Image (cartoon, grey):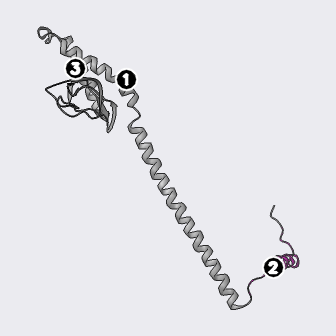
Amino acid sequence: MPKEKEPLPERAAEAEEAVAELPEGPETPEELRTALEEERARAEEYLDQWKRARAEFANFKKRNEKEREELLKFANSVLIAKILPILDDFERATKTIPNKIHALTWVEGIFLIHRKLQAILEQEGVTEIEAEVGKEFDPAIHEAVAHEESEEYKEGQIIDILQKGYKLHDRVVRPTLVKVAKEKSA
């Protein structure tokens, strides 16, 4: 049911009461200019605060998106770290297979599984850390498990590579285990 309109005299009385409740405004042109300047300053301050909040929100969104991408990029790192010993086992097994049985189909199958495992890890962004005997030890990508006196190598050079290391994109998943030369004692 539609609401009936109030009689006009009652509505006029309400309007007069509302006008009476309004705060007194400036009366002179100078007071009007001062009030206008105050309101402009307040509006400018609100606009500035709004722009700052908008910029902070945009930065928050960018930071949040970047963190999300990083999380997705490295989400598999724990699983990959668990798979790397299997890859090591395959490499050790393929190195010890006698030459006379290389042609057997089941041996070729083992080599094929090894290559597929390597391909899958490469697709996920896993790369082998380059380590060479004679290069300088880098604690960011190598782990020294032994130090050995050497006349052939300078102190801090890699003497032997004991286990391959791997990176997932640009992060080390497993450092290369190396033996490092130390200065020969007198």
Q: Amino acid at mark 1?
A: Lys
Cα distance between the residues tagged 1 and 2: 77 Å
Magenta segment includes 25: yes
Residue at the disc numbered 3: 112
The magenta-colored residue range is: 4-26
- Image coords of residue 158 (percent x, y): 21, 29
Cα distance between the residues tagged 3 and 2: 89 Å
Q: Which sits earlier in the primary sequence, circle 3 or circle 2?
A: 2
Q: Quarter of the image containing the N terminus?
A: bottom right
Residue at the disc numbered 2: 19
Q: Which quadrant of the view contains residue 170? A: top left
Residue at the disc numbered 1: 82
Q: Which sits earlier in the primary sequence, circle 1 or circle 2?
A: 2
Count of numbered badges drawn on the protein: 3
**Front label number (1 vs 2):** 1
Cα distance between the residues tagged 3 and 1: 20 Å
